[in-house]
Amino acid sequence: MSKIAANLVEEVESKEIEKPSRVRWWLAFMFFLIGLIAYMDRSNIAIIAKPMMEDLNMSKVQFGMLASLFSLGYALSQIPAGIIAERIGARKIVMIALIWWSVFTGLTAMVKSHGLLALVRFMFGVGEGPMYPGNVVFNTHWFAQQEKGRAASALLAGSYFGPVIAPVITVAIFQVWGWQAVFYIFGALGILVALIWYIVGRDRPEDHPFVNKQELKQIMENRTVTGDKKTLAPWKKFLKNGRFWALGLQYFIVLYIITFFLVWLPTYLMEARNFSLGEMGFAASLPWLGIFITVMSGGAISDLLVKKGKSKMIARGSLAIAGLIVFAGSMYLAAYATVPWMNVLWLTISLGALGFPVIASWSAVMDLGNEFSGSVSGWMNLWGNIGAFASPVLCGWLAQNIGWEATLLVSIVPVFIAILLWFGIRPDHSLT
């Protein structure tokens, strides 16, 4: 054999054994960073609640309204964002969302009027709205069926890791430069990440220059969509389906509770448990570390169960129900804990347990929606953020009128409704 022929054979053989690239997982990590920034932007206002309320002369109810208006803007943008994400793709809509919410993050530090501040937080919520629908559309095109749980984990894990590190970073910035600097710095960081995402991201693996044939084959062989669907979701059919409503209503309950932690946990720890600002920064991060761990592990557990041939009701539903049961028990123990750090331990287990229904919900969105997963995720997240809209004001009112202990106990009641709703979702069958 000639040297040239031998080289050609060697080149062909090397191509045949070339390992699949892992571009999809690097882009999933990019969504981890996007979620990290998004939730740091959401949670930093809660960390500096006391100095901000004092500086702007705001009551608890007025401050709670800021978080509620964020959630209202976020909720109202969900369905339009899902539809638009299906039309224009994840690359553009996520970049636009990042720049939008980062601008309004910076504006939070500039306005002093309560009315204008309320408008800024509402628009901030509108800007963050497309993040999850955009991610679901991305995951639907980029990941095989048995990878959906782990794919959903990426953005969610980043989101819940944000509040883990936000207290430490936010307190450090506040102590050096004041509370306004917190919003300026986080806003600038978000714009930088938006530009990076647009450079490295693509809507489909077929379009990415660094995806090799082996990775593309892995994705395409087990993908549930063709990548060419551009028609509008069958909303009339969806709205007549009880499973569609059950998915949204259970997420209303889950995000109602998570938002209580996001908005009021730092204030609760200082007022009810007498933590100092420095102690609170560490203590408030622990429950978010808990949910970060369960979101990361929950996606892997769910995917493993699907790979082993278990039904999606087992892989998604049993995981969600188990998490809700653990939450109810540990929240009860947190309310009656007499030692402050035992209270933090039970709160960590409580919020951590909610990571399982969260990851199960976002995995079920892709199971139920397929090529219309953007619209289905928008619907679910609409209801979730109606719950998030109600939570800050209602929990602030409850804390002010009946005390923190009773406020924690009240949050247990709707969890039993969420458990029943999961039996109605049945994620094994698509809605289409």
Image (cartoon, helix red, strand yellow):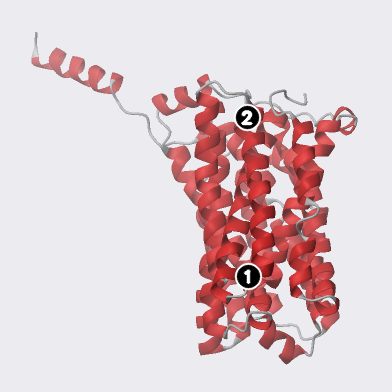
Closest to the observer: 301 or 190?
301
Mark 2, secondary structure of its residue: helix
Q: Quadrant of the N terminus?
A: top left
Outermost residue on the top side: it is 1
Q: Which mark is residue 431?
A: none
Q: Amino acid at mark 2?
A: Ile
- Where is residue 67? Give x, y as percent: 76, 69
Q: CA distance from mark 2 to mark 1?
A: 34 Å
Identify the amino acid type marked 1: Ala
Where does residue 430 sit, x and y in percent of width and height? 73, 24
Residue 299, image x and y in percent?
54, 40
Foreground of the two, 115 or 193 = 115
| Front-lying residue, 253 or 409 | 409
Which of disc 1 and disc 2 is earlier in sequence?
Answer: 2
Mark seen at residue 314: 2
Picture residue at 18% right of the left edge, 19% below the top: 10
Q: Residue furthest left?
A: 2
Residue at numbered disc 1: 337
Question: In the figure, residue 38 lies in which quadrant?
Answer: bottom right
Instruction: Tell me the SS state at disc 1.
Output: loop
Q: Is residue 351 left or right of residue 259?
A: left
Q: Quadrant of residue 229?
A: top right
Q: Quadrant of residue 17?
A: top left
- For image coordinates 53% across by 29% down, the residue present is 305
Q: Which residue sits at x=81%, y=49%? A: 383
Q: Is residue 10 visible?
A: yes
Q: Note whether residue 31 is visible.
A: no
Bin the neighbour count of mark 1 within 10 Å (Cα to Cα): few under 14, some 14-19, many 20 and up.
Answer: some
User: Mark 1 and mark 2 in contact (Cβ < 8 Å)?
Assistant: no
Please state which of the two labelled residues, at mark 2 or mark 1, is closer to the viewer.
Answer: 1
